[in-house]
Image: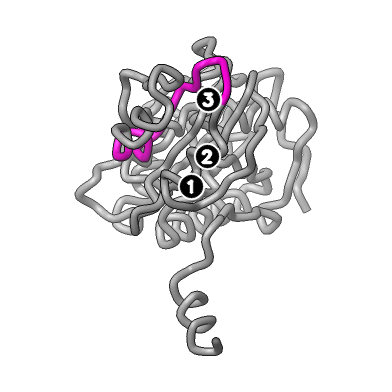
Amino acid sequence: VIRSYYHSTQMWTLALDTTTRRGGAALALDGEVVEEIASAPDRSAAARLPGELMTLLGRHGLHTGDLDVFAVATGPGSFTGLRIGIATMQGLAFATGRPLIGISGLDALADIATRQGRTRVATWVNAWRGEVFAALYENGRQTVAPVVDRPEAVLVKMTGSPVIWFMGDGAQTYRSNIAAALSAGAAFETEPEPLVVGSIARLAAQAARAGANPAPHAIVPLYVRRPDAELAKSRQRG
């Protein structure tokens, strides 16, 4: 059972992202990011967690029991990274009796652009195999649900005006494809791979303040594409 988790008028949120190459951790107070760090890309998530989180908390004189909300990226992205990240934060949330709020990495990317005043935002994350995980947002609201497909197939759904701002490593990988299809209808952020974990912390804090209080086991991963093992079984049956 999740107990009431506000210690005082202040609310501490700890967030983790292990779904992308530029994963990281963030600490927020009342929805404002206090510190955001990128993970070491040369070390696996399993090797660096939870030490990385404890180091972040230690720099601010905090322990896990001082936190009010835990947040984790729910995907899409690496299946292995996704499982490790969710399991890590579930363990901390269960141990402290705090809620665990899942935030889509695509929503976090869109939040960064929306806060910068962008009206139409396309979030593209590299899905490998020549594909991207993608979604479209207008004024902060998702208008095209997450899909995984080849860039040219995704671009068919992303026409019209005003200009679409493309975010994420997938947008940089397939920048030439996007420019060829949309010409002046596309724009790109100067930061090719923004760190999204701070945005995950902000969105989770907003959800908590609005009344969200989910139990750790209620987390729902955003896979978009089925794991390779499931795909292989389907091919064998078919």
Q: Residue at x 35, y 47 (%)?
A: 51
Judging by the rendered image, the residue that carries numbered circle 1 is 153
Q: Residue at x 54, y 33 (%)?
A: 158
Pick the residue in front: 47 or 75: 75
Q: Are marks 1 and 2 in contact (CB under 8 Å)?
A: yes
Judging by the rendered image, the residue that carries numbered circle 3 is 121
Asked where in the image residue 177 lies, by quadrant, the reply is: top left
| Residue 25 in picture, x, y percent from top left | 41, 36
**Stretch in magenta:** 160-174
Q: Amino acid at mark 3?
A: Val
Q: Secondary structure at mark 3?
A: strand
Residue 109 on the magenta span: no
Left or right: residue 147 compared with residue 21: right
Compared to residue 35, the image places residue 64 above or below, namely: below
Q: Residue at x 51, y 49 (%)?
A: 75
Asked where in the image residue 70 lies, by quadrant, the reply is: top right
Q: Residue furthest top?
A: 117
Give how far apart the Cα atoms at labels 3 and 2 are: 15 Å
| Residue 80 in picture, x, y percent from top left | 41, 62
Left or right: residue 182 compared with residue 87: left
Left or right: residue 207 compared with residue 113: right
Q: The C terminus lies in which quarter of the figure?
A: bottom right
Q: Secondary structure at mark 2?
A: loop
Which circle marks residue 9 in the picture? none
Which circle marks residue 156 in the picture? 2
Pick the residue in front: 98 or 116: 116
Residue 162 on the magenta span: yes
Which of disc 2 and disc 3 is earlier in sequence? Answer: 3
Which circle, 1 or 3, is nearer the viewer?
A: 1
Q: Amino acid at mark 2?
A: Val
